Image: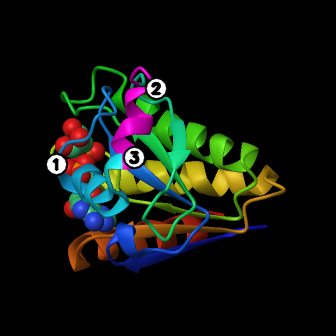
């Protein structure tokens, strides 16, 4: 079975078959990790994204990685947190699940995720970590292709919360 590794770092520097972008539904770039990925990949990424006609929240679309060390970028718009009554948890789960499905379809063995929706979209971090790790872990049980999933946390605080959530999950089993 594939493994989950939690690290602190900048996802634009990660060498993986695919990195995931916490995008918005236009897929035309923005701030946060989305802005960083577009800057590092170069203009060609935006050109390819323009042809995709956006993406629904919780769905995922794939492009080349251009100037990034990663071969592919998987773009997934996470849900905006509105208090938890607008299906946010299921939509966040869909982001991870659909991104992994796409990675598998493209034969990716290593996939790196940022902490989707927990920046300007304000999804509560502990809840997001638990959803992310559970969805990835369940996916890895049946995947024949994906060998390693990296959770790339941008700060010590985020890394600690994901590490605690992973530990909690391993004790529940
Ligand atoms: N590498 C890894 N993680 C990062 C990086 C990086 N280079 N930069 C930021 N993060 P956010 P969202 C972390 O706001 O909440 C954009 O404008 C960040 O610290 O990037 O899903 C899009 O266009 C946080 O932990 O994404 C959308 O409009 C996490 O990535 C909107 O923001 C997610 O924060 C999406 O909001």
Instruction: State the residue position of label 1.
Output: 31
SS at badge 2: loop
Earlier-in-chain disc, 3 versus 1:
1
Residue 13 lies left or right of residue 122; in this view the side is right
| Location of residue 49 in the rendering, given as x and y in whole percent from the top left corner | 40, 35
Mark 2, residue position: 52
Q: Residue at position x 67%, y 51% from top? A: 138
The answer to whether residue 150 is seen in the rendering is yes
The dominant secondary structure in magenta is helix
**N-terminal-most mark, 2 or 3:** 3
Q: Which residue is mark 3?
A: 45
Measured as percent of width and height from the top left, residue 163 is found at 41, 75
Name the image colouring.
rainbow
Quick check: is 48 in the magenta stretch?
Answer: yes
Does the magenta run of residues contain 57? no
Say which residue appears at 32% left-offset and 73% top-offset. Answer: 10
Give the position of the N terminus as an image quadrant.
Answer: bottom right
- Tell whether label 1 touches label 2 (CB within 8 Å): no
Q: Residues within 10 Å of mark 3 (few under 14, many from 20)?
A: many
Q: Secondary structure at mark 3?
A: helix
Question: Is residue 53 depicted above or below 166 in this figure?
Answer: above
Q: Position of residue 121 (x, y in %)?
A: 20, 40
Q: Is residue 80 above or below residue 35?
A: above
Q: Tell me the SS state at disc 1.
A: loop
Q: Nearer the viewer, residue 160 or 79?
A: 79
CA distance for labels 3 and 1 = 15 Å
Question: Magenta span covers which residues?
Answer: 44-54
Figure check: 51 above or below 34: above
Measuring 54% from the left and 41% from the top, which residue is drawn there? 62
Seen at 72% across and 60% down, the residue is 146
Beta carbon at label 1 within 8 Å of ligand 1: yes
């Amino acid at each position: 079975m594939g493994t989950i590794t939690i690290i602190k770092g900048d996802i634009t520097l990660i060498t993986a078959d695919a990195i995931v972008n916490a995008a918005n539904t236009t897929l035309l770039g923005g701030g946060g990790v989305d802005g960083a990925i577009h800057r590092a990949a170069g203009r060609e990424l935006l050109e390819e994204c323009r042809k995709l006609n956006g993406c629904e929240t919780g769905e995922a679309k794939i492009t080349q990685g251009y100037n990034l060390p990663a071969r592919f970028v998987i773009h997934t718009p996470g849900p905006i947190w509105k208090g938890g009554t607008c299906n946010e948890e299921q939509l966040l789960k869909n982001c991870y699940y659909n991104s992994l499905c796409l990675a598998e379809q493209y034969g990716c063995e290593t996939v790196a995720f940022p902490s989707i929706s927990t920046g300007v979209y304000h999804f509560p971090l502990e809840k997001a970590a638990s959803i992310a790790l559970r969805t990835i872990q369940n996916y890895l049980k049946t995947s024949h292709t994906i060998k390693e999933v990296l959770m790339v946390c941008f700060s010590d605080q985020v890394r600690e919360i994901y590490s605690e959530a992973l530990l909690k999950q391993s004790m529940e089993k």
